[in-house]
Amino acid sequence: MPPSEQHVHDLVGIGFGPSNLALAIALREHAPLDAVFLEKQPAFGWHRGMLMDGTTMQVSFLKDLVTMRNPGSEFSFLSYLREKDRLVDFINHKTMFPSRLEFHDYLEWAAASFTDQVEYRSEVVAVTPVSVDGVIEYLDVVVRQGGCSDELTTRRTRNVVIAAGLEPVLPPGVVSGERVWHSEELLDRLPALRDPRRVVVVGAGQSAAEVTDHLHATFPDTEVCAVFAKYGYTPADDSSFANRIFDPAAVDHFYTAPDAVKRRLLDYHASTNYSVVDLELIDELYRRHYQEKVRGVERLRIFNASRVAEVAEGPRVTVEFLPTGERTVLEADLLVYATGYRPGDPLTLLGEAGEHCLRLPDGGLRVERDYRLATTEAMRCGIYVQGATEHTHGITSTLLSNTAVRVGEIVSSITRERSYAGRR
């Protein structure tokens, strides 16, 4: 269809998790643009497979979808509590960290206000440039709707914001199957697991410790084997000064820092976010492990300084103790890899439009301070990313801690560019 005959959105959001939900709120509050969001899930959901009883958020409720940008927003966590008639109860609870289940309910509550702007069961398969007089004025977002491979529609837009979330990571050669899972699948698949004799959990981070704890508590007769390369779980560094890495200003500092400083900062502060566990959970697992030793019946077995050397049908898991090379074979009913996530590559969605995106000397995408991808001069459209910016903006930029601030910056950028385009 000729550009003059097709409706053009100001913005198409790819994905509708917390990041683009926060963006939708910021648009409603500050810049009522013509925006639509495309989400391949059938309904709003955020790490549903890990919403285990007793698990809590690792960030303060004040770092919700809005408060760091607009403390008076009607979409704050406190507004949610007031509407649910739990504000006083939460205050009496004396905590800054709600349960993960409650925070997910807050996200669903906020998402319910945007059903007219979100199209669920809509998977983006390509983004195609549309040229007018030699410059790319629009992007056609090609969508597979309803899970039907032959039902494709197109949304034309001046800007896209990609927030496609994280992809679960499995070790090389490992394939998820009936009895080999990634931790993100845990609660979805656990009801089908009947009376396991032994389960093995691989990983040393928060998810691994939570899965170990949950399986041990859920199946009172099951042996739970935790396998990780460290001697013990490493406590998360959530001390007050270290938490400054999550301040909005830290994004500016990181963005302008020399490459060598960027690498050092990432190394210094990895312990605030990666392969670390809340100290309270570490202590609880150790207490349980020790008490079982006292009783002489060890259901919680810790294979530290170890790795999974081999997995055969069953699964039959061979664990190697790294200092000596000694091997232990575990006949298991379930093997769970809590081996983390990686950000999705925006170029896998951008297709032809990705050919206009510029790269850094090391091959990474060039991302401007306002989260807009640097592009060739022929590209007039804005391509923004939420996530996949750690290499340019630091740890802070990709996390929930910075979401409210990040979307405010994106909205300001889009409205500024829109105003400039109107004067061209």
Image (cartoon, helix red, strand yellow):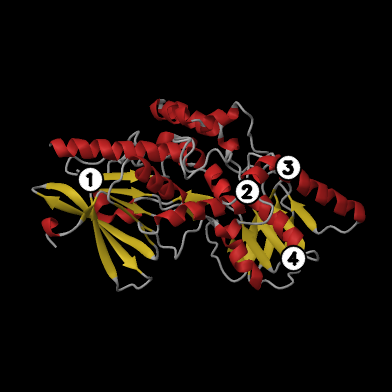
Amino acid type at mark 3: Glu
| Crowd band around label 3 with a 10 angstrom C-alpha radius: few (<14), some (14–19), many (20+) | few
Say if mark 1 contacts mark 4, CB within 8 Å.
Answer: no
Q: Position of residue 236 (x, y in %)?
A: 64, 38
Q: Is residue 290 above or below residue 126?
A: above
Marks 4, 2: nearer the viewer: 2
Identified at 49% across, 37% down, the residue is: 67
Please state the horizontal and vertical placement of residue 26, each as a whole percent of the image: 38, 42
Residue 300 lies, with reference to residue 417, above or below; the image says: below
Q: Earlier in the sequence, mark 3 or mark 2?
A: 2
Label 2, secondary structure: give it: loop
Q: What whole-number distance in Å separates the C-alpha atoms at marks 4 and 2?
A: 40 Å
**Which residue is under mark 2?**
86
Q: Earlier in the sequence, mark 3 or mark 1?
A: 3
Residue that mark 4 sits on = 198
Above-or-below relation of 257 to 149: above
Give the mark nearest the N terminus, 4 or 2.
2
Which class describes the residues within 10 Å of circle 4: few (<14), some (14-19), or many (20+)? some
Tell which of 355 and 398 is nearer to you. 398
Residue type pointed to by label 2: Arg
Q: Nearer the viewer, mark 3 or mark 2?
A: 2
Element carrying mark 3: helix
Residue ID for mark 1? 381
Taking the image as shown, residue 67 lies to the left or right of residue 86, namely: left
Find disc 3 in the rendering and name its residue.
280
| SS for callout 4 | strand
Is residue 371 something that shows in the picture? Answer: no
Residue type at mark 4: give it: Arg
The answer to whether residue 73 is left or right of residue 12 is right
